Structures are given as C-alpha cells and as structure tokens.
Amino acid sequence: MTTEELPFELCIRRVGNGFILKTKEIDYECDVVVTHENVFEMDHTKTEESLGELKAGLAMLWYVIEYFGLRKSKHDKYRMSADIEGLEE
C-alpha cells in the first residue's frame, strides 16, 4: 500500500503568529498512526504585518498542494499555482 492510498487527516489551525498544519496518516504495515505538525510563521521583519501573514498563508498553501501531489511541471498544460498578487521583490 502506498502513502497515497492511506487514509489521512489534515487539520489547519490559525494561531496568533501564523498557521499550524497537522497531518495524521495510518501506516498499516507498522500498525501505527503517524502525526506530523508543521508551523508556518509570519515574517515580522517586514514593515507590513499583513505581508508576513500572506507569506505564511502562501507557504502553508504550497505545503498542501505538494502534500497532495498537485504541483506539476511548468511544462505541463495544466497546473495549480498559488501566489501573492502585487508583490514586488
């Protein structure tokens, strides 16, 4: 059984400084539940606090996109993307 076939749980919680994303997967071969927790924190070095919040949210969204294998090659005709509009760096 591959990881893609395993039942899973994904929980996103908003906290004061960003987001916490928790995943739980059942590994039938080892008969255990594996829990992973990822923290996506705001970057407080920027002058605009809302930009730090957007960047934390974007990082969290990209994690979810990659978790489900939805990120495709730039050469694919169709692919999913997440971005912050108006951001110039």
Image (tube, grey):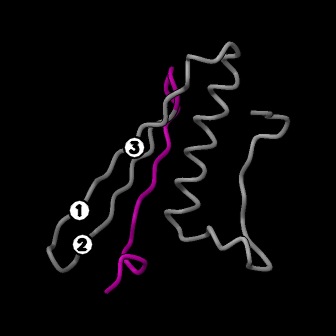
Q: Position of residue 23 (x, y in %)?
A: 38, 54
Q: Could you give the CA–CA distance between mark 2 and mark 1, rounded to whole angstroms?
A: 6 Å
Q: Indicate whether residue 72 is drawn in magenta.
A: no
Q: Position of residue 44 (x, y in %)?
A: 56, 17
Left or right of residue 73, residue 25 in this image: left
The label number, if any, that marks residue 38 in the structure image: 3
Q: Position of residue 15 (x, y in %)?
A: 49, 26
Q: Position of residue 38 (x, y in %)?
A: 39, 43
Which residue is drawn at the image coordinates 15% and 73% (left, top)?
31
Which residue is drawn at the image coordinates 70% and 22% (left, top)?
50
Q: Which residues are magenta?
A: 1-18
The quarter holding residue 59 reads: top right
The label number, if any, that marks residue 27 in the structure image: 2
Q: Could you give the CA–CA distance between mark 2 and mark 3, rounded to whole angstroms?
A: 19 Å
Which residue is drawn at the image coordinates 43% and 77% (left, top)?
4
Q: Indicate whether residue 11 is drawn in magenta.
A: yes
Q: Residue furthest right?
A: 86
Q: Is residue 32 above or below residue 38?
A: below
* Type of amino acid under label 3: Asn
Q: Dot 3: what SS? A: strand
* Type of amino acid under label 1: Val
Closer to the camera, 23 or 45?
A: 45
Closer to the camera, 52 or 21?
A: 52
Q: Residue furthest left?
A: 30
Closer to the camera, 7 or 87?
A: 87
Q: Is residue 70 above or below residue 77?
A: above
**Label 2 or label 3, whichever comes before in sequence order:** 2
Q: Assess disc 3: are there few (<14), some (14-19) or many (≥20) residues with their C-alpha within 10 Å of its C-alpha.
A: few
